[in-house]
Amino acid sequence: MRADMKANAAIAGTLAAALAFTGIQPAAADETAAQDPSALVSLAEAEYAIDSDNDGLPDDWETGGVVLKDGTELPLHEWGVDPNRPDLFLQLNWMAPHNGASFAPSAQSLQDIVDLFDEHGITLHIDAGETFTNIANYTEFHGGEVLPYSQYYFNGEVTGIRLLKDIETHLGDRSNVFRLGLIGDQIDRGNMATGVALVGDSAFFVGKNSQITTDEQLRNAILHEFGHTLGLRHNGAADATRKLPRNHAASPDYVSVMNYNQQFSHFNYSERGYTAQGTDGPIEVPADWDALVLNTPRIGHDAIELGVSFVSQGAAVGHAPAAPVETKAEKREVQVEAPVTAGKNTNVAAIIGAVVAALAVLGIAGAALNGLLAF
């Protein structure tokens, strides 16, 4: 799951160059950065953007907590995170009961998911309100039953747009750290699919309709839709399977909960890769666990703008990034002196987050960067 730092810097430079070409500047980039894309990369290589475990959360956040732009304090260092072990945060919300039917997942099913990730070297922290949380020293719940009952959750609204709105409604600035899972009845009139998600973004919906009758089925549906937000499609890793037709049937060699044919019978992502037959020849698809994308664009996306902003004894203590220098030559000197630790990863999510923010001004949603919406 570790990305090469030079490759990350190249990607960041390409994004910055594209923005400069269109005249769009990320919030954290000054005029010099727009003219010189490498200046933006130097910001990402500063100490406050180092991300050793490539989970999207800067090391500084994991060791000292963070105060978000809206003033929300997240003491991640007290919640059991580890800058050298990937951490994922998931908030789950669901509809109020209807006709005696509950939409809440069981505590055991959520513990099963936590244990599965732990077995694969990832710490999954879940806020499901009073039903379940495994976050140490966590006292202010946001998960749980907060949605009013509605038979059709999207009710004719474009699912991707609604999920993007849900991120803002239920997470706000906390989307720097948390992903969002929603559970309700049907997706829409005549749609009995068991879920929909933004691939490589931070929200999914599970339809606990009449087809899901057990805790285990709901558990698997959550794992399936959560997998989409981590970059998996129904044939495996999105990066590897983009060349396959969207309606391409999953191979029986793809043993994963992401495979429609195994969604309710196999509780795991794939442990080994397989060969998919594409229209232009065979495609090697890696094991799901080797291909999960944790540092998706929304996670840690305000890192550059926030700089270092620690939580200390209930008060915000920190400093913002250094003020822009006057000339390109001086900016390059700052790059050379930027505190970069060898072998650590750049938080490219923070850079892409600035790009997403800029595109949002033009009405281009973050999910459109992937062009993907999965069921």
Image (tube, rainbow, N blue to C red):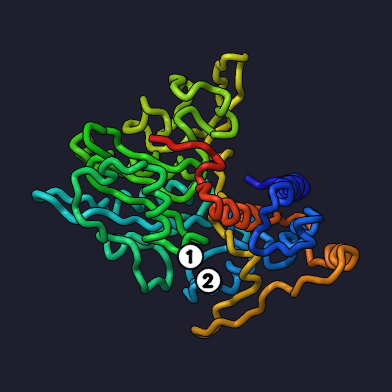
Residue at position x 21%, y 56% from top?
148
Residue 135 in the image, given as x and y percentages of width and height: 42, 65
Query: Which residue does the image show at 45% across and 54% down from the upper left?
Result: 179
Disc tally is: 2
Crowd tier of the residue under label 1, counting other residues whose Cα lies within 10 Å: few below 14, some 14–19, many 20 or above: many
Tag 1–tag 2 contact (CB < 8 Å): yes
Amino acid type of the residue tagged 2 in the rendering: Leu
Q: Is label 1 in a helix, a strand or a loop? A: helix
Residue 85 position, x and y percent, is: 58, 57
- Return the residue at label 2: 68
Residue 4 in view here: no
- Residue type marked 1: Asp
- Front-most of residues 162 and 183: 162
User: Residue 164 in the image: x percent, y percent?
Assistant: 42, 51
Q: Which residue is disc 1 drawn over?
A: 173
Q: Is tag 1's residue or tag 2's residue first in the polypeptide sequence?
A: 2
Residue at 49 percent of width and 55 percent of height: 88
Is residue 336 shown above or below 119? below
Residue 338 sits in which quadrant? Answer: bottom right
Residue 342: assigned label: none
Circle 2 Cα neighbour tier, 10 Å, few/some/many (<14 / 14–19 / ≥20): some
* Position of 372 relative to 98 (above/below): above
Query: Label 1 to label 2, Cα distance in Å?
Result: 7 Å
Image coordinates of residue 257 in percent, x first then y, are 40, 34
Residue drawn at x 39%, y 62% as measured from the top left:
134
The local secondary structure at tag 2 comes to loop
* Quarter of the rendering occupied by the N terminus: top right
The quarter of the rendered structure image containing the C terminus is: top left
Can residue 145 be seen in the rendering of this structure? Answer: yes
Left or right side of 143 for 249: right
Q: Residue at the far left: name it.
A: 99
Asked whether, in this view, residue 19 is left or right of residue 248, the answer is right
